[in-house]
Amino acid sequence: MQYRRRLRSRIIISFLLFGTLLTAAFAVAAILLRGYMEDQLIGQQLNLELGHYVEAFRRDPENTIVPFSRITGYVWSDRKFANVPFAWRGLSNGVHTIVDDRQSGGPQSYVLAVHKEADAWLFLQYDMSHEIKLRRWLIVGLIGVVLLFSGISALIAFWAADSVMRPVADLARRLGQSSRGQGLDPLASHFANDEVGQLAATLDDYAARLTQLVVRDREFNADVSHELRTPLAVIRGAVELLLAQSDLSDKVRQRLLRIDRAARQSNDLTDALLLLSRNERQGPALGKLTDVGTVVDQVVETQRAALGSKPVNVQVERLAKPQVEAPAAVLAVALGNLIGNAFKYTAEGEVTIRVHLDRVIVEDSGKGIDPNEAARLFDRGYRGSGVSGQGAGLGLAIVLRLCDLYGWKVTLGARENGGAVATLAFH
């Protein structure tokens, strides 16, 4: 499952990132624009002043006074070019930005306008220390503005996230109450007619339809279970009466016993399906425990007809006398599917049923189970590859549901010497 942040966190992070990035972009743009405009204005002004200075110098070469407070002018005639600072000598005409690291008070930044002629070199130096200080204060101020607006964005984000998520959280809380068995009241009446309200109305409609399906399913299962018990009781009663006759042949008696076992098995399956439909875990009648060994013997006798005339030896090994807190019908259905499958898919050899203190193990010498398909055999309707004969693939799915209801565990696997092994563990 792909990881995603909670919706509230995503809203907060989105607002915070948006506010921070927007403010930071504005601050960077302001710094760059100020620097660009400052360089352009200073350069243009120096060029203008230098032009005026050159004209004044030509009118009066002896006048070297520069009437500027932050601008210093320098003039060297062709006889004094050697006195020009070394860093200035190679500069071409125009405006240059220079950083002098040799000053004792720290690096000095200034803008220098240069005008060189054959008989004179003229320079105007503009001190940038004041602008540098202003630029630093501007950067500090803009950083503070970015932090301030980031904090405001965070506050707005938390407020917006709480406002947006409050109805969603309320909807989740009400749904959580219904999942804990507190009942589901209509949701739409608690919300405004917005997106959350529409979602609540859709959930109400879905819950109503689902409730109808559940109620109808439970009623159907209860009705079927009730109606099936009557004909099953009639069948078993008629079989008992017939078996009481003394003039029955052995063949007829065996057929009547087979009918009685099938009727008992159907009755057990009806009881188990009724418990599953109600999702109701029940114990044995009168609070007694069910003896596992006795149920195993009954199931083996009931399922023996699946062997027919196949040369299969059936062994029941009682290594302990376990008891479980579950109806005999439920245990009979679970063991009946495991033992019945062993009988059904074993053509020859043996089927061994071992009763341990906490589990029952059924081993057979049949064709075995593909390890890659073992887990899927419990899926509803899945029968496995290469399986022939009739069957809907529901038996093991029913066993798994019963195990989930009673806290048991069922597994299927391949036996080392060929065949399959099924285990029903009660803890």
Image (tube, grey):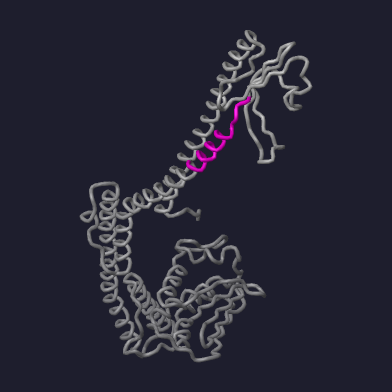
Residue under the point 37% across and 52% down: 158
Q: Residue at x 39, y 89 (%)?
A: 289
- Residue drawn at (47%, 84%) of the image: 296
Q: Report the residue at 38% width, 51% height from top.
A: 155
Q: Picture coordinates of residue 260 (x, y %)?
A: 37, 81
Answer whether residue 127 is magenta in the image. yes
- Figure check: 197 above or below 380: above
Name, please, the residue furthest toward the front: 62
Q: Position of residue 5 (x, y in %)?
A: 46, 54
State the residue in front, 165 or 353: 165
In terms of depth relative to the viewer, which is nearer, 54 or 188?
Answer: 54
Outermost residue, top side: 59
**Residue 393 in magenta?**
no
Q: Which region is colored magenta?
A: 125-141
Q: Give how far across and how far down residue 278 sits, in percent.
A: 31, 71
User: Which sits in the foreground, 4 or 182?
Assistant: 4
Q: Which residue lies furthest to the left in this view?
A: 189
Looking at the image, how many numbered discs can be counted on the residues? 0
Q: Where is residue 245 in the image (x, y as percent from the top left)?
A: 33, 88
Front residue of 385 and 263 = 385
In the displayed structure, would residue 88 be above or below residue 168? above
Q: In this view, does 301 lie to the left or right of 269?
A: right
Task: Considering the whole magenta stretch, tell me its main secondary structure.
Answer: helix
- Where is residue 326, by image quadrant? bottom left
